[in-house]
Image (cartoon, rainbow, N blue to C red):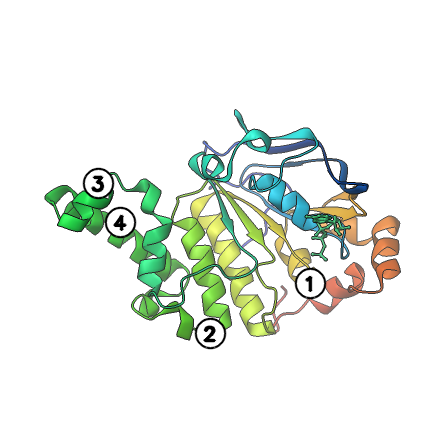
Amino acid sequence: MSAAAPGSTRDTTRDDVPPVEVDGVSVAFGAIKALNDVSFTVAPGSIHAVIGPNGAGKSTLFNVLSGVYRATSGEVRFGDAVLSSMRPFQIAGVGVARAFQNIALSGAQTVAENLMLGRHHLTKAGFLSSGLRLPRATREGRVHGERIREIAEFLDLGDKLHTPVGVLSYGDQKRVEVARALCIEPRLLLLDEPVAGMNAQETERMAGAIREIRAALGISVILVEHDMGMVMSLADRVTVLDFGRRIADGTPAQVQSDPEVIRAYLGSGTETDPAEAAAAHTTDATGSPA
Ligand SMILES: Nc1ncnc2c1ncn2[C@@H]1O[C@H](COP(=O)(O)OP(=O)(O)OP(=O)(O)O)[C@@H](O)[C@H]1O
């Protein structure tokens, strides 16, 4: 697959995907400014990464984007929708889906059952008619069942639809989490550390899935991630936070050579130097350029 021009839209971008505008967002927890006047724009149909050392404010930003935290000041807009003043269910209603960092699936239920839960707000028949298996519910169930199968196959989970999630490998479970987010048919997908805890092979598989999601669905993806090599090979654009402030925003090549970014990462002593990580990631497991 050819790489998109950084920050650009792709031919496949849906025409109903507006930019995400993060505009002067601050979040204070008492005296701690977890986010301090952060602004950036996510171009429609782009993969946009938010990175930064521990405590930089990434999770706080993610929680503002998904309606879990309220911004103390500033605004997040997605077209006409002001995400920063909406509740999580309203945000889902405008087509923004979130996959959680810590897997939030029901382990005893099958992949198909978990995905059906993700589609529940799209079903019109309601609990009562579904329970009574009335014709409308049966017809609706068939349509949703077909779409769930498509989404599962898309994420390489087609043969696991009837497997309880709890017995799947960690990498498979993380892809079920992403599949469930896709089940709301989003225009914007929020991924919270999608490869945290994954081995190299699982990481490569997830990166491939994210590229395919963008290419096939034409939606925007915002990911918060620690794995620098993955970000540098995947993202069109990267916003770097440090101590709640935006210290850089640009293409992967621009941010990885930015002196302030290098200083922030080296100073933290907890993360990989972005330039080193990118260099280490110039070849992937197959030996081809990442
Ligand atoms: N609910 C909270 N109450 C008080 N302080 C908080 C809360 N959430 C985050 N913070 C503080 O805000 C700052 C930013 O934290 P945040 O978790 O957003 O950073 P992060 O970049 O996601 O870090 P990590 O990579 O370690 O997950 C930190 O100083 C953190 O201690």
Mark 4 within 8 Å of ligand 1, using the beta carbon: no
Q: How far apart are labels 2 and 3 at the CA level? A: 34 Å
Dot placed on the residue nearer the N-terminal end, 2 or 3 = 3
Callout 4–callout 3 Cβ contact below 8 Å:
no
Of tags 2 and 3, which is closer to the observer?
3
Q: Which residue is mark 4?
A: 144
Residue 99 spot, x, y in % from top left: 51, 53
- One can see residue 286 in this view: no
Q: Which residue is mark 3?
A: 125
Dot placed on the residue nearer the N-terminal end, 4 or 1 = 4
Callout 3–callout 1 Cβ contact below 8 Å:
no
Residue 158 spot, x, y in % from top left: 33, 65
Q: Which residue is mark 1?
A: 229
Q: Which residue is mark 2?
A: 169
Up the image or down, 73 lies above or below 209; here it is above
Up the image or down, 88 lies above or below 147; here it is above
